[in-house]
Image: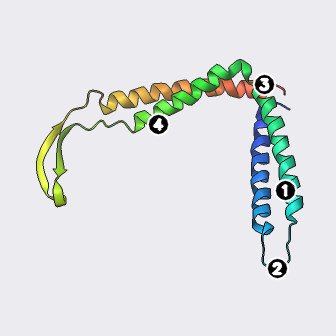
Amino acid sequence: MNIKQALKLKNKLVKENNETFAKLSQYNSVEEGTVRPYDPKEMLAKWNEGVKQLVDLKTKIHRANAPVYDKIFKLAELKSMVSRLNSLGCVEGKQSQRGGWGQPTEPVVMIADIGILQRDEMIKTLENQIEQIQDELDIHNANTEI
C-alpha cells in the first residue's frame, strides 16, 4: 500500500474508532432492563484494537514520510501564513468611528503600511508555493510504499 492509500485508511480508522467509542459510551450505562444493541465490553475491545491498528498505521506513515518532513512542515507554515495574512487589517482612508453609547465621533484617517493589493499578492505567491509543495507530496504519497 502506498502512503496515499494509507492516509485514506487512517481517516477511515479514525472514523470507525470514533463510532465504536460513541456506541461504547451510549450503551455503557443504561437504565436497568434496557436492551443494549451493542455490548459495551465488545465495543471496548473493538475500540482498543482499532486504536492499536491506528497507532501501527500512523507509525508506518511517519517512517515513510521522513524524507519529506521538511516539505510537510513548510506546507503547514505556509498555510498558517496565508491564514494570518487574510486577517491582516489593510484599511485605508477616512473611517467613521463609534464612541460610547454608539455615538458617532470624528472620522479618523487610516493608513496601512502593507496595502490590500500587496497583501493579496503575497497571499497569491504563498498559495503558489503551497500548490507546488502539495504536488510534490502527492507524488511522494503515490510512489512511496509502506
Mark 1 in CB contact with mark 4 (< 8 angstroms): no
Which label lies toward us, 3 or 1?
A: 1
Residue underneath mark 1: 44
Q: Which secondary structure, mark 1? A: helix
Q: Which secondary structure, mark 3? A: helix
Q: Quadrant of the N terminus?
A: top right
Amino acid carrying label 2: it is Glu
Mark 4 in CB contact with mark 3 (< 8 angstroms): no
Residue 28 relative to residue 45: left or right: left
Marks 3 and 2 sit apart, C-alpha to C-alpha, by 48 Å
Q: Earlier in the sequence, mark 1 or mark 2?
A: 2
Amino acid carrying label 1: it is Leu
Mark 2 in CB contact with mark 4 (< 8 angstroms): no
Residue displayed at 17% across by 61% down: 101
Residue 110 relative to residue 124: left or right: left
Amino acid carrying label 3: it is Arg
Residue underneath mark 2: 32
Which label lies toward us, 1 or 4?
A: 1
Question: Is residue 109 or residue 32 the one in the foreground?
Answer: 32
**Residue 63 marker:** 3
- Above-or-below relation of 84 to 11: above
Q: Residue 4: name its quadrant.
A: top right
Residue underneath mark 4: 83
Which label lies toward us, 3 or 2?
A: 2
Marks 1 and 2 sit apart, C-alpha to C-alpha, by 20 Å
Marks 4 and 3 sit apart, C-alpha to C-alpha, by 29 Å
